[in-house]
Image (cartoon, rainbow, N blue to C red):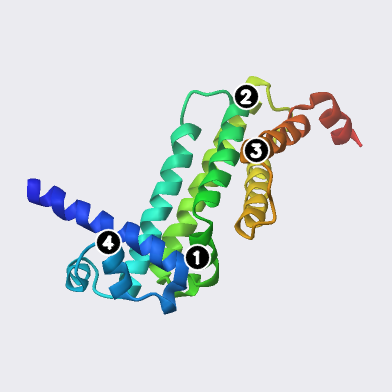
Amino acid sequence: MAKEFQQHDKKILILRAAVKVFSKKGFHLAKIEEIAEEAGVGKGTIYEYFNSKKNLFEEMFIRINELYFKNINEFLDSDKEVKEKIFLFIYTHLKFISEHKDMAKIMMNEHHLFSEKIMQKTIKQRQKLIKNIEEVVSQGVATGEIAVPEPWLIAQIIGGITMNISSNIIFEEIDKELTEIAQKATDILWIGISAKKDYQTWEQE
């Protein structure tokens, strides 16, 4: 059992080193030797866990994705208030992107390197995330907190706005505090979807 833990820890160490090196140099310029040096292991040790640089790059992407979706879905499934869940989704997403912006750039520019299987898995994970947001909105509609009975559309809007803000963060076009951005975005969205009187007036027109 101790040996299994040791092997697992070494693999995690290599993946963390890969994040640093790939973030700095990109896929094509990064070398296995540099990742090994960053991880404090021999080059041969890396090949005990990964059969190629592309395999290491893909698994690193999978691990980062898993961490992202775990962080997001944890509170979407919690007992928190609907508005707080929306805020936490926006804030957690922006914070994660801010902490991994170099890697996010690489993922955007070199997504063609990933296999079809990995891309399909990522698409399904994102679809599940939007479905979870939709369920949060449905909860708000059921309790009367949200007046607009369009959970799917509202979930798409929340996701779209959040992704657009994060793109600005990736390319360093935003210098405001993330909590403030997330709170203001949530407040603006909430005014629109919770305004029952305005929605009923609009619906009748």
Of badges 4 and 3, nearer the viewer stands 4
**Cα distance between the residues tagged 3 and 2:** 24 Å
Position of 57 with respect to 204 (left or right) is left
Q: Amino acid at mark 3?
A: Ala
SS state under label 3? helix
Q: Residue furthest bottom?
A: 28
Residue that carries the numbered disc 3 in the rendered image? 182
| Disc 4: CA contacts within 10 A as few (<14), some (14-19) or many (>=20) | many
Q: Position of residue 165 (x, y in %)?
A: 67, 50
- Give the foreground label among 2 and 1: 1
User: What is the crowding at mark 3: few (fewer than 14 residues within 10 Å), some, or many (at least 20)?
Assistant: many
Circles 3 and 2, Cβ within 8 Å, touching? The answer is no
Residue 39: horizontal and vertical position, in percent?
Answer: 27, 61
| Residue ID for mark 4 | 39
Query: Do the CB atoms of the residues marked 1 and 3 lie less than 8 Å apart?
Result: no
For the view shown, which residue lies furthest in the top direction? 143
Q: Which residue is mark 2?
A: 142
Q: Could you tell me the amino acid type at mark 1?
A: Met
Tell me which label, 4 or 2, sits earlier in the chain. 4
In terms of secondary structure, where does tag 4 sit? Answer: helix
Q: Which residue type carries mark 2? A: Ala
Q: CA distance from mark 4 to mark 2?
A: 51 Å
**Which residue occupies 54% across, 51% down?**
97
Q: Of marks 4 and 3, which one's residue comes earlier in the chain?
A: 4
